[in-house]
Image: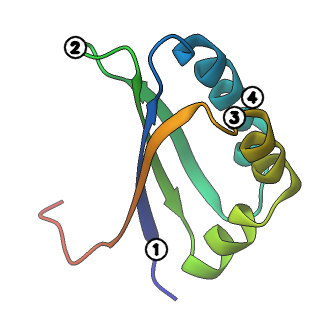
Amino acid sequence: MSQLTVVARIKAKAGVQEKVHQELRKLIPLTLAESGCLNYDLHRSIDDPTLFLFYENWESRLLWEQHMAADHIKTFRENTEGLIEKLDIDLWTLEGNLG
């Protein structure tokens, strides 16, 4: 199986971005403890405080799919229901590098 890179963009609704940020931060230690998680990095836009990005690397797509079914992801969805304007998830595989 090949390594999977995930780029997830989360756009919070205006006025609730701090609640969404708080819930996103809760995911970090739980996800890093999961099997197959290589990194799980949360970023926030400099220009738009309602826009967040996770840059993630997983040992395989199967392990990421298990992550997406985990209890802490379900809890995140429940705790942020109605607070997220848009969520985009892009999946990538490494095709080569110069290093």
Residue pointed to by mark 1 = 3
- Residue shown at 70% from the left, 44% from the top: 32
45 is higher (above) or lower (below) than 73: above
Residue 10: x percent and y percent? 45, 39
Q: Earlier in the sequence, mark 2 or mark 1?
A: 1
User: Along the horizontal axis of the image, is 58 left or right of 10?
Assistant: right
The quarter in which the C terminus is drawn is: bottom left
Q: Position of residue 86 (x, y in %)?
A: 43, 44
Query: Which residue appears at 54% of the width and 47% of the height?
Result: 39
Horizontal relation, residue 42 to residue 71: left or right: left
Q: Earlier in the sequence, mark 4 or mark 1?
A: 1
Using the rendered view, name the quadrant where residue 66 is placed: bottom right
- Which dot marks residue 26? 4
Say which label, 4 or 2, has the lower sequence index: 4
Residue bearing mark 3 = 80
Residue flagged by tag 4: what amino acid is it? Lys
Query: Which element is circle 1 on?
Result: loop
Point out the frontmost of discs 3 and 1: 3
**Residue 94 is drawn in which quadrant?**
bottom left
Disc 4 + disc 2, Cβ < 8 Å: no
